[in-house]
Amino acid sequence: MMKRNICLVIVTLFLSLAAGAKEKDVVAMQSMVKRLIPAYAENFQFRKIKPIDGKDCFRLDASDPRKIIISGNNANSMAMGLNHYLRYYCLTTISWYADIPVEMPETLPAVEKPIQIEAKVDRRFFLNYCTYGYTMPFWQWKDWERLIDWMALNGINMPLAITGQEAVWYKVWKKIGLTDEEIRSYFTGPTYLPWHRMANIDGWNGPLPMHWLDSQVELQKKILTRERELNMKPVLPAFAGHVPGALKRIFPEANIQNLGKWAGFAEEYRCHFLNPEEALFATIQKQYIKEQTRLFGTDHIYGVDPFNEVDPPSWEPEYLSKVSADMYHTLTAADPKAEWMQMTWMFYFDRKDWTAPRVKAMLTGVPQGKMVLLDYHCENVELWKTTEHFHGQPYIWCYLGNFGGNTTLTGNVKESGARLDNTLINGGSNFKGIGSTLEGLDVMQFPYEYIFEKAWTLNTDDRSWLNALADRHTGVTSEPVREAWDILFNQVYVQVPRTLAVLPNLRPVMNKPNNRTSINYPNTALLQAWQKLLQAPDCNRDALRLDIITVGRQLLGNYFLTVKDDFDRMYEAKDLPALKARAAEMREILNDLERLNAFHSRCSLDKWISDARKYGNTPELKNYYEKNARNLITTWGGRLNDYASRTWAGLIKDYYSKRWDMYLDAVVAAVENNREFDQKKLDGEFRLFEDSWVSSTRPVEVTPEGDLLIYARFLLNKYERKIN
């Protein structure tokens, strides 16, 4: 009898816990709907169902005409189901930016017949260390809240979550014996923390204020709580050997070596690496994991990325195998359930040094199945094909898509989809997931939506997918907009992503082609796409407004290069009237680019600067954060000038145009005075101007003028004959 009662209690407890879990997922989704579309919250009903053969799944039901019923095995699957309904029934795009509202139809369309969709892969990864610098350094909770919703809506369940780690490190280093000055001077400024976290640079734009460390802790707690509510397993950082140089003061005998120099930065910014064989390594790892878990909890998945774009202390395979084995052992000593996640970017970036034996040594030093690899840049090189499927270690196929937060139209999206389709068939049993490792969000979401939909059994052909994309960007079915997207997808988005830019964004140089401006499509194709977009009945939808701006600014930026080449030829010919005419046209294009971008806050500098200043709570901190924001997108540091360029209103007017004015004036003056143009002298003047701009706190003012569609059609009429 007692045994029966005990069993009854256990069963009751189990059922109550199961009901509680169900309620938790449903409540999470009801809260999401209230955040995104509060006026429609009562029209949606969410239900919990079992996975299908252990796979995530969602279902749209047609059983109740009064409600939109969305079922899923957890909140993450339900969110994917919600997004499917919003995309394909409501023709709605959810932006990853919090300040862009969700545009809904007046009446919710009914689900006429039920659909059921399953996940093809268990793991869907998102983000990149660099995204935390190029896009998110000054984000507040409201910004993160929207991005987390966007991730869930796209089925992402494994986000990189590295906010707040400097506060953890501060406590660890302080406990070990470093001073406040030694620790905060070791950290970089906030926009540069991604490259400090990857052991590329120390100290640049530091010391990092305590205000930053404190505010990031509370932010990370909110981020992780929400991600876990939506059934995500955040990837937290762990110790990868990067230590402050000042650690030698306390442990003079420790095996601490310099890592290789990075990106032209001076010796003083070089990073230091503690050999994992040292007992001190395991001590630091344990202290870090313990403090991080105390603050943030853990899902036992840790990003550990040694030797990113820098040389290890030794290239011997035996050393590399021992390093990875020792690192893994320190990780599992601190957390016995630990799983190591490693990005494979370094194998591509330093491919001459990371030979097959060295890659094998690094990967096989860790027990099989305990190191998950991000195949980082699959639209370019699929490393799983050249590394014997990563020697059996589990891997996630990733689309990178964006470098530096650049605003160019780039990405071989169609080809990437075909590559992913092949991997889903032939990727092997250790292929475990799909991800995106974009460096910056920018405003073009469609490549990432396209890639993440392939993680599910939607099985939509490209033509149908594009038509649906065009319809939801417009809000209605528009054949010209569909035709525009056909051109963009099949003729323009064909270029493997890299650090591309339009010429207006780059420092002017005489007669020196810049490979960052190369395009793999005729500008006339882009012109045709813009002509079609501008036949839309209106541009009330935010997504279409962004399409019009991004295509238009790329079109004019490409044309600017043509005029600049003419200008340089007129200099060689010493044709002063023609030279002045080309100079006037270049200035006019820059003015038109400024005005076109001013029609959207996400295409403007003032938003970036405003967010940076709002993060500070004193005038000094506001100025400090602003300088970091200005620095990153312009001079950067080292040899990375203009790496993170953006075609933004305000930046064009106050920065890029000023450099071009200096160049045009200097070249015209050289011809007028019958002397040679002095590029070296002008480069020195550029540096003085650039440094002055970075240090400035002069307010940035961007004001849209008129109607976007009318103005864009005016520009089309102005330039189409010149470009054709």
Image (cartoon, rainbow, N blue to C red):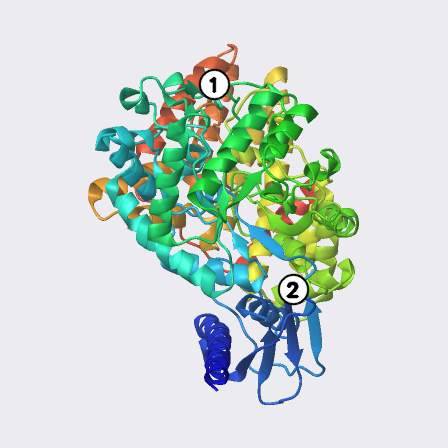
> Measuring 64% from the left and 25% from the top, which residue is drawn there?
358
* Residue wearing tag 2: 536
Vertical relation: 690 (above or below) 132 = above
Give whichever of discs 1 and 2 has the lower sequence position.
Answer: 2
Q: Residue furthest front?
A: 1
Q: Residues within 10 Å of mark 2 (few under 14, many from 20)?
A: some
Which is more toward the observer, 590 or 461? 461
> Measuring 68% from the left and 70% from the top, which residue is drawn there?
52
| x, y percent for residue 218 | 31, 54
**Distance from Cα at disc 1 to Cα at disc 2:** 45 Å
Q: Can you tell which quarter of the image residue 520 is in? A: top right
**Quadrant housing the C terminus:** top right
| x, y percent for residue 322 | 55, 26
* Residue wearing tag 1: 669
User: Relative to 658, is 540 on the left or the right?
Assistant: right
- Element type at marker 2? loop
| x, y percent for residue 59 | 65, 75
Q: Is residue 508 visible?
A: yes
Which is more toward the observer, 277 or 353? 277
Give me the disc on residue 678. none
Q: Can you tell which quarter of the image residue 166 is in? A: top left
Mark 1 belongs to which amino acid? Ala
| x, y percent for residue 220 | 37, 53
Mark 2 belongs to which amino acid? Ala
> Measuring 71% from the left and 56% from the top, which residue is drawn there?
484
- Element type at marker 1? helix
